[in-house]
Every structure is written in C-alpha cells, then in structure tokens.
Image: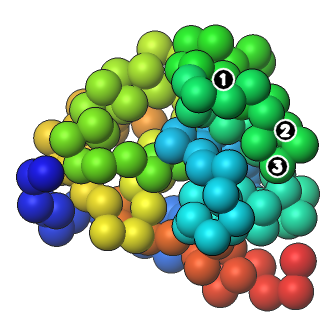
Amino acid sequence: MAGCELPLDNATDADVQRILASAKTVAVVGLSPKPERDSNRVAAYMIQAGFDVVGVNPGFKEILGRPCYRDMASVPGKIDIVNIFRKPEAIPPVVDQAIEAGASCVWMQMGLAHNQAADKARAAGMDVVMNKCIMVEHRKLFPGS
C-alpha cells in the first residue's frame, strides 16, 4: 500500500461549511456493512444528520437500509459529495468516476490524501477536502443539528 500524502492545498473551515450546508446527497465509496467500521459509523451519522446517503460497494445491494451501488456511474440522480473510504492507490479512479458522475465535491476521509487526484478534481470544477472526517467536521461546524 502506498504511503499517505499530506494535502498540499486543502479546504478551509469556511469551504467545508459551505460544502456541507449545500450538500444533500453523499455517496460513500467503500461503505462497509460492518457497524464497527468507520465508513458505516460515519454514513449512519450522516443519515441521522439528514443527508441522503448512498453506498458504493459492489458486494452489496443495501447497507444501513439504503441502496448500495457497484460504482458511481450506477448511482441515480445528482451526487453532491463523494466521500472516499478507500486505500490511497484507489483514489484516482474514484475521482475519475466522481468527475464523470458530475459530483460537486470529493471528500477524502481522515488519513487519506492524493494531491494529483485532488488537482484533477479541482481542474474539473469540484471542491476537494482531504484528510478530514466528514462526521467530525459536520459536528464541529453544525453543533446540535
């Protein structure tokens, strides 16, 4: 497995607040059906916070009572945030799919950063957040919601 990069350029708190305030649909790439996994806990939190969460995991049709798709091309409708829970080397193809799907933002979870993929997403007009947990950021910026 490739080592994790550090973000060379990352979203500010103001950027993150704007992204989360305007987002409705979050595609969780690498969503696990196991409750002890971070992807599952974060997705469950985002559902409770009012987001429309869809899973992207080719091994399952449904996780957390929500539909799960084999890839982002299979997800119907608009995707606002693509929340990535995959190994660093899997990030570039996920970003390519996010661009193809017309997503607004690519969000790489805590411990994940890929500067080249981030630059490609930004060049396509997307917001990029790296090495931040969407649940932690939401709790911090929208307390009590």
Q: Give the residue pinned by disc 2.
A: 66
Front position in the image: 9 or 135? 135
Q: Which of marks 1 and 3 is nearer the N terminus?
A: 3
Residue type indicated by callout 1: Tyr
Instruction: Please report the residue visible at 76 percent of the width from the left and 79 percent of the height from the top.
Output: 142
Whole-percent x and y of residue 75? 68, 19
Q: Give the residue pinned by disc 1.
A: 69
Q: Give the residue pinned by disc 3.
A: 64
Residue type indicated by callout 2: Arg
Regarding residue 7, the answer to whether it shows in the image is: yes
The answer to whether mark 1 and mark 3 are in CB contact below 8 A is no
Whole-percent x and y of residue 111? 32, 69
Q: How crowded is mark 2: few (under 14 residues within 10 Å), some or many (20 or more)?
A: few
Q: SS of the residue at dot 2?
A: strand
Q: Picture quarter containing residue 71?
A: top right
Q: Picture quarter containing residue 21?
A: bottom right
Q: How far apart are marks 2 and 1 (CA)?
A: 10 Å
Q: Is residue 93 left or right of residue 16?
A: left
Instruction: Please report the residue visible at 16 percent of the width from the left and 62 percent of the height from the top.
Output: 4
Q: Residues within 10 Å of mark 1 (few under 14, many from 20)?
A: many
